[in-house]
Amino acid sequence: MRAGRLRTGLKGWGGVGTMAFACVLAVLAALLLPMVPWHGTGGGGGADDDGHGVARGNQARAARECTEPEKQTLAPSGDDGPAIDAIRAREGEKRKLVVGVDQNSYRWGYRDPNSGGDAELEGFDIDLAHRIAKDLLGDEDAVQFKAIPTDQRIPAIQDGRVDMVVRTMTINCDRLEDVAFSAPYFRTGQQVLAPKSSKITGYDGTLSGKEICTAAGSTALSTLEQDQKDGRLAADADLRTTVPNQLDCLVRLQLGEVDAVVTDGALAASQAAQDPTVELKGDAFTTEYYGVAMKKDADDLVRRVNRVLEEWRADRAGGWQHSYEEWLSETMGGAAKSLPPAPRYLRGS
């Protein structure tokens, strides 16, 4: 774990003025993040001596026949390959792992505005990114973070702007058509966030006629749209308000521009911790898993990340549990909610 990272806790963002200021800082920081040229991840479609070509075929077929997306990943391996070699081939200051992250999700990936100076990115996702960089390049600081909005996560991977995305990204079947995922590293589910004074009680009929904010390109938005078509969500619930980043929904809620927010319960809990005037309403109404997203042909990188995740889960001193207790236990709850999901891999991979 990095000794030099700032650990100052974020105390009660509560006010709209502070939140707006934090959003401005986030935008400015995103614009200032340096650009690193992409050198490609390589990877081909042919079979290797170790059968990775067969595994790639299994992975593509599983994506088409997807029913349990969190299990559609390759078995761990410590072997190098074209994607890892391309990252290591970068020279000088450019020899870094380029990771797409959020910088305004409290306790996941954020800059603490109370810490002063040039606040470093910190949080649960950031810890994982450092861990992967340590494994690949021998230095946990050999990582360049790029702040990307929710709806740019997949394009950033496909366009080669990042090597991977570690940004509370839900593994689902639609996304498996475009990117590859690691094994899951966190379990969550969609929940409703609303003012404590609201009569909304959860994901139920009390959302009728209410304006709901979601992030563009998010699982929350696609779930709500499908549920409305299928009659599980009131037809007059207004889903028109979408924003680039999830934190913008909290600001809209604070300003009274929307009635509720729907997002992953893990993020909703963090937003409730930022503002004591809002709370989670009802239980989670889906089950979802966060994974590390990478290019579809980067099989060696997917396998290596899965090995890192296994080691991170098993490390009792500075691994998954340590990061959970440091960043999430205060907002997510105790031991019953603090177990990492068990990995499952594609058969024959």
Image (tube, grey):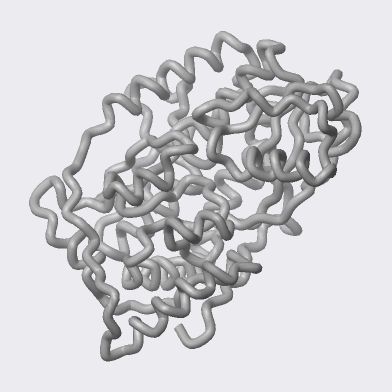
**Viewer-nearest residue: 63 or 186:** 63
**Viewer-nearest residue: 343 or 325:** 343
**Viewer-nearest residue: 164 or 227:** 227
Q: Is residue 66 left or right of residue 119?
A: right
Question: Which residue appears farthest toward the top when viewing the image?
Answer: 17
Q: Say above or below: 27 vs 83.
A: above
Q: Say above or below: 190 vs 91.
A: above
Question: Which residue appears farthest toward the bottom when viewing the image?
Answer: 49
Q: Position of residue 125 (x, y in %)?
A: 47, 48
User: Which residue occupies 76% across, 42% down?
Assistant: 229
Q: Position of residue 289 (x, y in %)?
A: 61, 57
Q: Say above or below: 29 vs 80.
A: above
Q: Position of residue 169 (x, y in %)?
A: 52, 49
Q: Is residue 129 left or right of residue 139?
A: right
Q: Would you say residue 278 is visible in this rendering?
A: no
User: Which residue occupies 30% across, 25% down?
Assistant: 31
The quadrant the C terminus occupies is: bottom left
